[in-house]
Image: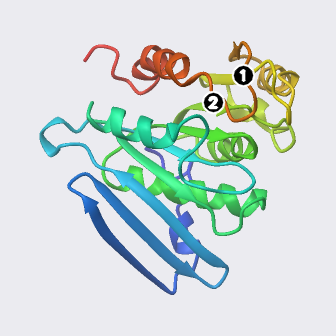
Amino acid sequence: MSDDADPSNPTAVEALHPLAHSEVAITSNLVHREVYTGRGLLTGLLHEPPPESTVPAAIVMCGGAMGGLLGPGHALFHVLGERWAQRGVRAVRIGYRSPNDLDRCAHDLACGVEWARDVGAERIVVIGHSFGGAVAVRTAVVMPASVAGVVTFATQSAGCEVAGALGGRPLLLFHGDQDEILPAEASHMVQAIAGGGEVVILPGDGHLLAKSDEVIIERLDAWLPNVLGLADD
């Protein structure tokens, strides 16, 4: 990993100028972490794989403009975290210091990428819902050495004007065709700006993707291993 490619001086975490931090193991494989800063509280939930099966890969997830740690669907971020940790992939769920502040939220997601990287993840996929899609894209653009791919759920296009700088890295965009907040055209627009990627339209589903958990999980089961470098495992 090149120090020239990702923020390193200071790192994203150091640039928070943290006042204090604390963490507790909720279960044997789920850690709750908090970082206190002068500009709000950064929260993380970290799904830890069994040590004997850990692989050098991770997924890092973030919510929409209102924040949150569960994600769309039926707590999809928790489901993905548990599912992929069982396969040896670390998972991090980020709770923003200041929801709906794009730059600050991207900084928070970058901290999650660093947490995964610092414990051995060499290939990381960032995942964001709604507003978080723009957060994920922007974080990937500034962390090319760590972030191998991007997944968005019902993304907005605002804030994704930099998607062309993804440089051809894998991009997977899910969107319901009955989205009552952001039309599916938003995902197609991000795909066009990026110059590639795959848009998966979810028939009959809305902005919270409450009808598509199984479809999303199945598609990610097929897509993530190759992007995370696990296809031959």
Q: What amino acid type is highlighted by mark number 2?
A: Ala
Which secondary structure, mark 1?
A: loop
Q: Is residue 10 above or below residue 182?
A: below
Kindly tell me whether residue 213 is visible in this rendering.
yes
Which secondary structure, mark 2?
A: loop
Left-right relation of 133 to 114? right
Residue underneath mark 1: 205
Residue 182 at what x, y percent from top left?
85, 33
For the residues labelled 1 and 2, the Cα–Cα distance comes to 7 Å
**Location of residue 189 (image quadrant):** top right
**CB under 8 Å between callouts 1 and 2?**
yes
Residue 210 got which mark?
2
**Location of residue 16 (image quadrant):** bottom right
Left-right relation of 227 to 150? left
**Location of residue 181 (image quadrant):** top right
Kindly tell me whether residue 10 is visible in this rendering.
no
**Residue drawn where x is 81% and y is 21% of the image:** 178
**Residue drawn where x is 38% and y is 54% of the image:** 46
